[in-house]
Image (tube, rainbow, N blue to C red):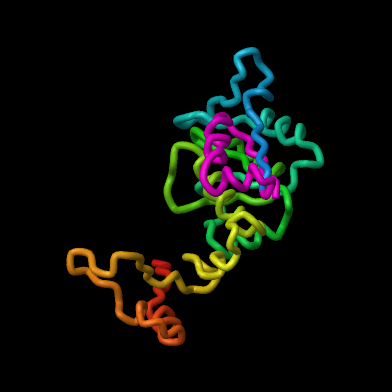
Amino acid sequence: MKFNFITLFPEKITSYFETGIPGKAVKQGVVEINTVHLRDFADNKHQKVDDTIYGGGPGMLLQVGPIYRALESLGENKGKVILLSPSGELFNQTLAREIYESSETLTFISGYYEGVDHRVTEHLIDREVAIGNYVISSGDLAALVVADCLSRFVPGFLGKEESLLEESHNETEELEYPQYTKPYDFMGWTVPDVLIGGHHEEIRKWRQKNRKTRNHS
């Protein structure tokens, strides 16, 4: 799977994909990342890509022109285009699966300041996605959250694919069960005895009984 990131801070993206599981996946060619520096597509010598808001209002908006030209530079390698925005669809595991299955190539546009010119949303993207009902300083963080989640669907990313089936936030309304590791007793806090008895059916029943459910409130 290939991810393009249209961003003002390419180093934020590349540094994330240099370590841990994402770094290993990139080195092995399981996922491919490509950063597009938005300032390279400014039409002025100062590489300015934002401006004041028509009709007044605080803050600045990213201009439609640089984003349009950045997307055009990708040509056929653009795939589906996703804008990270607080007003987008709320991201969850079901939406993650849907986006993953929609294209082998995805392009993320990171919002900044007060967001982007609405013509980007109207004419240049396929989806607008929010990672939560809150505002953060940079769409780069949101883009990385979405990309990391989608990467976990790619065969070979996790190494052991069965972990995807059991991990937190599967695509039902259940979350993962409590898990423990050694030591058995830590300051009087002990592991449930059923988990150390070796009876697989009893362990399965205990885990199912102790799964948490999602809170939608």
In this orientation, which residue lies closer to the viewer: 41 or 157?
157
Residue positioned most to the top: 45
- Does the magenta segment cover residue 11? yes
Q: State the residue at coordinates (59%, 49%).
A: 147
Residue 10 is situated, as x and y percent measured from the top left of the image, at 58, 31
Q: State the residue at coordinates (63%, 62%).
A: 97
Q: State the residue at coordinates (42%, 85%).
A: 199
Residue 177 is situated, as x and y percent measured from the top left of the image, at 41, 72
Q: State the residue at coordinates (72%, 36%).
A: 71
In this orientation, which residue lies closer to the viewer: 28 or 77?
28
Q: In this view, does 150 lie to the left or right of 106?
A: left
- Does the magenta segment cover residue 171? no
Q: How many labels does the image show?
A: 0
Q: Is residue 153 above or below residue 180?
A: above
**Residue 54 shows up from this direction:** no
In this orientation, which residue lies closer to the viewer: 22 or 145?
22
Q: In this view, does 127 lie to the left or right of 149?
A: right
Q: Quadrant of the C terminus?
A: bottom left
| Residue 160, quarter of picture | bottom right
Report the span colored magenta. Answer: 1-30
Q: In this view, does 89 lie above or below 56?
A: below
Residue 82 is situated, as x and y percent measured from the top left of the image, at 64, 47
**Residue 23 shows up from this direction:** yes
Residue 213 is situated, as x and y percent measured from the top left of the image, at 42, 73
Q: Is residue 164 left or right of residue 195?
A: right
In this orientation, which residue lies closer to the viewer: 33 or 179?
179
Residue positioned most to the right: 76
